[in-house]
Structures are given as C-alpha cells and as structure tokens.
Image: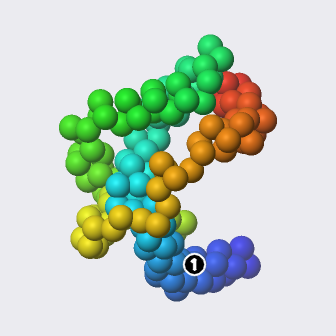
C-alpha cells in the first residue's frame, strides 16, 4: 500500500512539475518588470552564491554590524566571485535540475533572464527611502539575525 501511494504521489508531482516551473518563470517575468534586468541579475547572483553570502552575513551579524554594512559585504562577496559565476551557473544546472524540485535551477533562470530584452524596471532603489525601510524592518532584521547566528 505504501508503494502504491508513493508511486501515485511521484506520478502526480511529475505531472505538475512543468506548471510549477512555468509559474516560477512567470514570477521572474513579473519581477523583471518591477526590478529591471540589473535588479533581477543581482537577485539571481545572490541566490547562486547563497552559501558564500550566508557565511558572510552570519559573520557580520555575530559582531553586531548594521544592515547597511551587511548589504555592502554581501555585494562585495558577489563581486569577488564574479569570475566563478558562469561555473556556478553550470553547476546549478547540472546538480539542481530535478523533476521533483520546487524551483527551477538558478542557472536556467539566469539563462532565461539573459535571453529576454533588457528592462529598466518600474521600481528604482533611488526612488525609495531605504533608511525608512530599514528602520521599519529593523526588528525583523534583528530577529532573523539572532536566528542566523545560532545556526551551527
């Protein structure tokens, strides 16, 4: 009975995988419209290098750095790994491709993003008062920071 149920579950997941990935690509298209090509590339590069960014973020959170410093350090990590991005992208395509994955690999998402026409985006970070946003999200930053620093 367990084998029958597991087989039925795998079959249903396989049948719905394409629509799940299509929804993810559609969400990327909406985000591209809002953030623009540069914003989406930065987002995908952050996802691609999430381990290095996470390690840097944890280190700076442990010493009590503010959000602006952590953001600068995360950006620096991405720029330092700029040479490795194509290799990381290829590795993502090879290792993260699965019929049962909840999201398509970041490498595929980056390739698709590069194939679309360049977009400026409707939301400009210069139009936002980022200090006010950081102040409003301050308690949440501290909560997440405490959770990240206690991860082994």
Residue 152, horizontal then vertical, whole percent: 64, 25
User: Which residue lies at the image location 71% right of the left edge and 73% below the top edge?
Assistant: 2
User: Which residue lies at the image location 59% right of the left edge and 42% below the top edge?
Assistant: 130
Residue 116, horizontal then vertical, whole percent: 28, 73
User: Which residue lies at the image location 73% right of the left edge and 79% below the top edge?
Assistant: 1
Above or below residue 141? Residue 129 is below
- Lateral position of residue 137 relative to residue 40, left or right: right
Numbered disc 1: secondary structure = helix
- Lateral position of residue 76 relative to residue 10, left or right: left
Residue 37, horizontal then vertical, whole percent: 35, 61
Query: Mark 1 — residue?
Result: 13
The residue lying furthest to the top in this view is 63
Residue 27, horizontal then vertical, whole percent: 51, 72
Residue in front for this viewpoint, 37 or 8: 37
Above or below residue 112? Residue 60 is above
Q: Is residue 108 visible?
A: no
Q: Is residue 92 visible?
A: yes
- Lateral position of residue 69 relative to residue 52, left or right: right
Residue in front for this viewpoint, 138 or 80: 138
Above or below residue 73? Residue 121 is below
Identify the image's colour scheme: rainbow, by chain, secondary structure or one colour.
rainbow
User: Which residue lies at the image location 49% right of the left edge and 50% below the top edge?
Assistant: 125
Residue in front for this viewpoint, 117 or 120: 120
Q: Residues within 10 Å of mark 1 (few under 14, many from 20)?
A: some
Q: Which corner quadrant of the image does residue 79 belong to? A: top left
Disc tally is 1
């Amino acid at each position: 009975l367990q084998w029958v149920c597991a087989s039925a579950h795998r079959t249903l997941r396989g049948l719905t995988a394409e629509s799940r990935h299509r929804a993810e690509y559609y969400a990327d298209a909406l985000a591209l419209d809002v953030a623009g090509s540069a914003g989406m590339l930065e987002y995908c590069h952050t996802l691609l290098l999430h381990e290095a960014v996470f390690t840097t973020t944890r280190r700076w959170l442990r010493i009590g750095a503010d959000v602006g410093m952590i953001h600068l350090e995360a950006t620096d990590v991405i720029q330092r790994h700029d040479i490795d991005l194509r290799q990381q992208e290829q590795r993502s395509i090879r290792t993260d491709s699965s019929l049962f994955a909840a999201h398509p690999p970041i490498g595929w998402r980056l390739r698709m993003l590069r194939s679309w026409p360049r977009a400026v985006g409707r939301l400009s970070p210069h139009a936002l008062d980022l200090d006010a946003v950081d102040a409003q999200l301050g308690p949440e930053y501290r909560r997440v920071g405490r959770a990240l620093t206690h991860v082994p």
